Image (spheres, grey):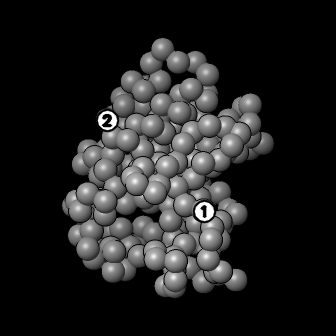
Amino acid sequence: METTQYLASSEYIDWKDENVLAKAKSLAEGLSDDADIAKACFEFVRDQVNHSLDYKQNPITCKASDVLKESTGYCYAKSHLLAALLRANNIPAGLCYQRLTITDVPPFCLHGLNAVYLKQHGWYRIDARGNKPGVAAEFCPPLEKLAFPILTTGEANLADIGAEPLSVVTETLTGWTTYQEILGNLPDIEWG
């Protein structure tokens, strides 16, 4: 399988940033198995980086290095940091999306998560959005334990694993400056 694009450093998945690289190496210290390293990176982003809306926290971040620096981000930004930490440890990682409702009825919005390529399991989706009452994402391959199930007509797991974030996501994160503005302008795509 060709994984080069899932290991690349880029504008938003900027794992060659010295702070991202240092954090990635510290998370992997003493570990050799790719699943153990991936779990350490996942748990760090899930548990130590605040979800902007849950914590009503600014600034809005998009680049992995900014998410790490500010310790906050919407799900999309957190997925950028997780991809960067995994790639810095030479573990292929991509970006995935779900199309969800916020309150079980339309409108819909995208939710950002990741897929990681584990030697033992292949591509495995993980969701480092951050747990809270009613949300319990875990790292337990091969079983997926994502933050949100698909429940409502029109919701969907989007099948693609992207090497780069969707432009609608980066335009939203770079086009607004507060968590309240993002909440009122969550990205979505046409589906179905």
Mark 2 or 1: in front is 1
Lower position in the chain sequence, tag 2 or tag 1: 2
Residue in the foreground of this view, choosing between 185 and 138: 138
Is residue 135 visible to the viewer in this orientation of the structure? yes
Q: Which residue sits at x=42%, y=31%? A: 24
Find numbered disc 1 in the image and state the secondary structure of the residue it sits on: loop
Total count of labels: 2
Q: Which mark is residue 19?
A: 2
* Dot 1 crowding, Cα within 10 Å, few <14, some 14–19, many 20+: few
| Residue type at numbered disc 1 | Pro
State whether residue 186 is above or below residue 162.
below
Find numbered disc 2 in the image and state the secondary structure of the residue it sits on: helix
Residue 130 at x, y percent in the picture: 41, 50
* Quadrant in the picture for residue 161: bottom right
- Quarter of the image where the C terminus is located: bottom right
* Quadrant in the picture for residue 43: top left
State whether residue 151 is above or below residue 18.
below
Q: Tags 2 and 1 in contact by the CB under 8 Å rule?
A: no
Whole-Å distance between the Cαs marked 2 and 1? 34 Å
Q: List the residue tagged with mark 1.
A: 149
Q: Which residue sits at x=71%, y=39%? A: 142
Is residue 8 visible to the viewer in this orientation of the structure? no
Residue 101 at x, y percent in the picture: 51, 76
Q: Which residue sits at x=62%, y=37%? A: 140
